[in-house]
Amino acid sequence: MADVHVLGTANVRKLLWEYSLPAIVAMLASSLYNIVDSIFIGHGVGALAISGLAVTFPLMNLSAAFGALIGAGGATLLSIKMGQQDVENAEGVLGNIVSLNLLLGSIFMILGLLFLKQILMFFGASGETLPYAYDYMFVLLIGNIVTHLYLGLNSAMRSTGAPRKAMLTTLMTVVVNSILDPLFIFVFDWGIRGAAIATVLAQLIALVCVILHFMNPKGLLHFKRTAFVLRRRVAYSIFSIGMAPFVLNACSCLVVLIINQSLLKYGGDLAVGAYGIVNRIMMLFGMLVLGFNQGMQPIAGYNYGAKKMDRVNMVLKQTIFYASGVMVFGFLLVEIFPDFVAQMFTTDKQLVDLSVQGLRIVFIFAPVVGFQMVVSNFFQSIGQASKAVFLSSTRQLLFLVPLLIVLPRFFGTMGVWVSLPISDAMASILAAIVLFKQKIIRENNER
């Protein structure tokens, strides 16, 4: 395992790229993983299947919220403990990541399976899209524990000095999924359920690899039997730090729910499918930014724990610069080639036209989204959960939800689309204000 102590001594820019590049590849792979599913479903099952897949997004976001609560919170806490040279308690955090994922993952799976049809109808399924949404989500819920454990332990591996291994396991899921998707959909004729089975099997294989990594007794950090016992203080710390990404994903669940219901009401099933395509593309570039954020997280967390504030400030500024570049590229791609992007998912002309309209509008203020995402993640990385939660929730709860409730009543589907970039702009302004007032930044600028 890599020496994590270099996080406090090596060149910050070099470290950021060293930790971000594997994370970026992993996040890109993770996003492509979802896009591959959508492409095969769109071309192999049909346009309504794309709409059915979009209906599952709120429930998947809710599942991701609980996964992030433990995974992101545990990974950040691990980085801070390693920065404090506290290996013994870091192992306790690692064990509790496993136990908490098993507990919450099981509860979510059971409740989800019991009320799946009712949940999907509430999330915007119609009589035509419900069968597709149900078949897909039923399989994912069966494999929910696998998903939570894989994502949580993969984040832990990245935060404890093994970013390349974390990257390779994620790449493995993409390769396996890309092989199994066409096999299950086209050859076995399993339809949308085949895509879900491919997803769970790919994650299961990756999970085995991650578990083997932490079972190595020669590793700096490895599983110990006594560490799996839940500790109230450790669980509280994981939850408090992980609350920001939890709120972000929970808010995403609420937002997608409102969007799906509004689009179904004013535009029908294909409008819901168009948002599914727009959402996948926005997630692609958002995941790239998240890759930089994950590269920043162990560097910022370690140096904050070691009280090296100059290095904390430096990695923040560089992450903002690179993340903004990613979103500018996404803006240019979507505004110049929207038809090409939409046609990757479907050949249905009506669905393509609806997707092009949504893409062009939603990406209007994309260049500022990277800044907002980095600033929110920064406060999580240094353990300032309240600020991270505030910034994570305001874009969606304070700005986006009211816009989604009001504007569609006057402008129909156009009101849904324009709500998204307006909230992006407002949230970025708020993030700039909070960052300016942050004591660390002010102190470094005064030197």
Image: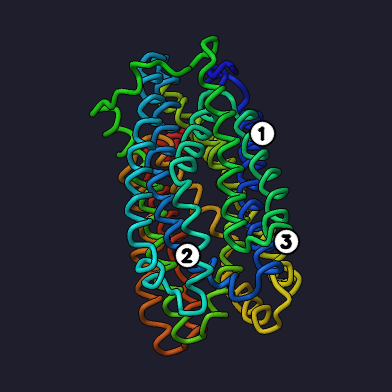
Q: Say what amino acid the circle numbered 1 marks.
A: Leu
Q: Do the numbered discs 1 and 3 sit on residues whose CB atoms are within 8 Å?
A: no
User: Circle 2 — which element?
Assistant: helix
Is residue 311 in view from this perspective? no
Which residue occupies the foreground of this view, 198 or 22?
A: 198
Q: Residue at x 66, y 84 (%)?
A: 350
- Give the quarter of the image for residue 307: top left
The answer to whether residue 321 is left or right of residue 65 is right
Spatial distance from mark 1 to mark 3, Cα to Cα?
A: 27 Å
Q: Could you tell me residue 262's position as x and y percent?
A: 43, 80
- Left or right: 238 as drawn, with respect to 39: left
Considering depth in this image, is 362 or 39 the residue closer to the camera?
A: 39
Task: Tell me which numbered mark, 2 or 3, is placed earlier along the sequence.
Answer: 2
N-terminal of the pair, mark 2 or mark 1, is 2
Please name the residue that numbered disc 1 is placed on.
168
Q: Is residue 277 above or below residue 153?
A: below
* Residue holding disc 3: 186
Question: Which type of secondary structure does the marked residue at label 3 adopt?
Answer: helix
Q: How many residues crowd mark 2 within 10 Å: few (<14), some (14–19), many (20+)?
A: many
Image position, residue 406 (x, y; %):
36, 81
Disc number placed over residue 134 in the picture, else none? 2
Identify which amino acid the numbered label 2 is placed on.
Tyr
Asked if residue 318 is positioned above or below residue 186 in the image, the reply reads above
How far is mark 2 from mark 3, CA to CA?
A: 20 Å
Residue at 40 percent of width and 20 percent of height = 90
Q: In the image, which is nearer the foreground, mark 1 or mark 3? A: 3
Q: Residues within 10 Å of mark 3 (few under 14, many from 20)?
A: some
Name the residue at the top extreme: 218
